[in-house]
Image (cartoon, rainbow, N blue to C red):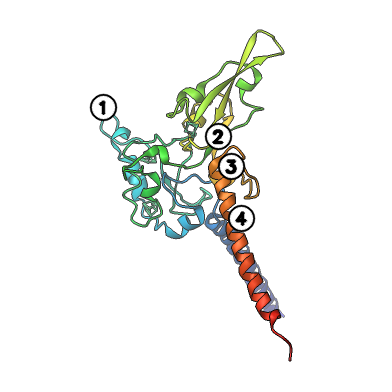
Amino acid sequence: MANSNNNRRKFMATTLQSVGLTALGGLLWSGYTDEVKASPLVLRPPGAIKEDDFLKACIKCGLCAQACQNRETNLDKETGVAKEGTLKMAKGGDHKLIGTPFFIPTEVPCYMCEDIPCVPVCPSGALDQLSVSNDKGELDINKASMGLAVVHKESCIAFWGIQCDACYRACPLLGEAITIEMHRNERTGKHTFMLPIVHDDVCTGCGLCEQACVTEKPAIFVLPNEVSKGIAGDHYVKGWDKKDQDRVQNAKAIETTTQRSNQSSTDYLNSGDLY
Ligand code: SF4
Ligand code: SF4
Ligand code: SF4
C-alpha cells in the first residue's frame, strides 16, 4: 500500500513537472516568436532595403551601430568618449528581431550625418548605398527614407491655436520637409493657426521633430513607410501631371498589345474549318 502511494506521488510529481516545463517552454517559445516576428513599427538605419528583404539580408554584425556610435560628431568634445549612438542592436525584450539595428527617435534620433558612416560599412547589402547617393554617386543623406513623420492633429497644440514651431525648428530640412501653413483663427478672430505640414517626398524620417515635440507624448512621430503611406492605386491619374499621364498611356499600350495577342490566338484556334 505504502509502495503504491509512493508510486502515485512520484507519478503526480513527474506529471506536474512536465506540465510546468511545457508551460514554461510555451512561454519561452511565444516570447521567442514575438522577437522573431518582424515588428511593423521598427525604424531601420538610412539606406535599409524593404523590411522583409532587410530581415533576410542583415547578418547582425553590428557594424552600422558601431560606426554610428563612433562617428566624429558623437564623441564628447572634452573626454573624446562616444555618447550613446542612434542605432541599437535589438536584444531580448526589444520586440524586434534580435541582433538587427533600429532606432527610437525619442531616445536618440538620426542626426543625418553628411558622410552617413553607418551605410558604407554594411557588408551584406541590407543597407543600400545607392539608395542614399545622388546622381553623381556621392552619398547624400537627404535621399534617405527611414520613415515618414506624421502629425496627430488632435494632440498637436499648433492645431489648437497655441503658437509652437518646435518640430519645424528641429527639422534639418527646415522649410522643405516641414513647412508652416498659416490659417486665420475664426474662433478668436485675431490669432493665426501656424500648422506644421510634413512633405512626404522630402521627409527622411530622421525623428528630430519627434524628439523636439513639446507635448507629453509626441504629437508628431515617425512611422515606417509601409505603415505611414497609403497607395492610391494605378487607376487614379493626376490630369495635371505629365509623368502620371505617360504612365497610364504606357499601361494602356501594353494592355492593348496583350489583348491583340490573346485575340489572335483565339482567332487562330477558331478560324479553321471543321472537318
Ligand atoms: S546617419 Fe544617422 S544612423 Fe547613420 S551614423 Fe549618422 S546618426 Fe547614425
Ligand atoms: S552593418 Fe548591415 S549586416 Fe551588419 S548589422 Fe548593420 S544592417 Fe545588418
Ligand atoms: S522626420 Fe521630422 S525632422 Fe526629420 S526630416 Fe522628417 S519632418 Fe524633418
Q: Quadrant of residue 78?
A: top left
Q: Which dot marks residue 221? A: 2
Give the label on residue 78, or none.
1
Identify the residue at image location x=44%, y=29%.
173
Query: Which residue is rendered at x = 64% and y = 22% of the image?
Result: 159
CA gap, disc 3 to disc 2?
10 Å
The local crowd at label 3, few if under 14, some if 14 to 19, many if 20 or more residues have their Cα within 10 Å, is: some
* Residue in the picture at 65% in, 14% down: 184
Mark 4 or mark 2: which comes first in sequence?
Answer: 2
Comes first in the chain, label 2 or label 1? 1
- Where residue 103 appears, as percent x and y from the top left, is 46, 42
Q: Which of marks 3 and 1 is nearer the N terminus?
A: 1
Instruction: Give residue 29's position: percent from left, percent from top.
Output: 57, 62
Residue 224 in view in this figure: no
Point out residue 18 in the picture as x, y percentages from the top left corner. 62, 69
Left or right of residue 13: residue 141: left
Q: Residue furthest top?
A: 190
Between marks 3 and 1 in the image, the one whose residue lies nearer the viewer? 3
